[in-house]
Amino acid sequence: MKITIVDGAPGHGFDPFHGKLVQITSALALGGHDVKNFRLSRMHLRPCTGCWGCWARTPGECVIPDETIQIRQAAIVSDRLIFASPLIMGFTSALLKKVQDKMIPLLLPYIELVNHECHHRKRYPAYPELGLLYQAEHDTGEEDLKIVREIYLRYALNFRTEFLFMETLDKESEELAYVVISH
């Protein structure tokens, strides 16, 4: 299975988080899976400006050059796209949101109805299934997790795929690797 992991933890003070994702990546690779792990805190990322250039000027590619092109290229040929982030003020990181916004070139500008809602048409025949690995804050409650889950379900719908799981990093790496491939 081809798996892309997007590590959205900010760089400073999150070494245990990054380390856990490296362990999960290693466990998946030992299981024979092709895994790419992108650590966003070490990448050059620029925000989406909403210019629609990815649809009009350079169809399928962002006009704002940065390293998100590597993530899009890996993601679109993956079976699973795993977002990973500590929860910060109740939601996943701004780094992760920046990358998620820059995935829009993978869709077409044209709209179609899906479950009585307007959504962009697919550019490609298949999209990776999504998962979220998260680390809760000390005051994270069930309502917070419900909101995060709902937003990722909506993201999956917009990305024209399935949201498979949302799992805390408080488990063993091998168990989390199994979660990634078993859903």
Image: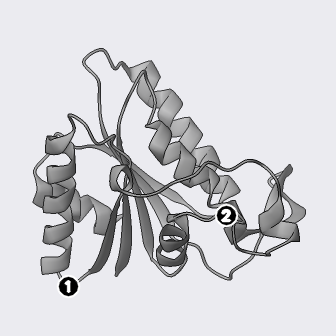
Residue to which mark 2 is pinned: 160
Please name the residue shown 39% across and 22% down the image. 142
Earlier in the chain: of badge 1 and badge 2, it is: 1
Please name the residue shown 13% across and 60% down the image. 23
From the viewer's perspective, tell me whether residue 60 is left or right of residue 183.
right
Q: Amino acid at mark 2?
A: Arg
Tell whether label 2 touches label 1 (CB within 8 Å): no
> In the rendered image of this protein, does residue 54 appear above or below residue 157?
below
Separation of marks 1 and 2 at Cα, in angstroms: 27 Å
* Residue 1 in picture, x, y percent from top left: 34, 82
* Residue 70 in picture, x, y percent from top left: 48, 73
Residue to which mark 1 is pinned: 32
Label 1 residue SS: loop
Q: Quadrant of residue 154?
A: top right
> In the rendered image of this protein, does residue 103 appear above or below residue 149?
below
From the viewer's perspective, tell me whether residue 114 is left or right of residue 16.
right
* Residue 114 in picture, x, y percent from top left: 81, 58
Q: Quadrant of residue 179?
A: bottom left
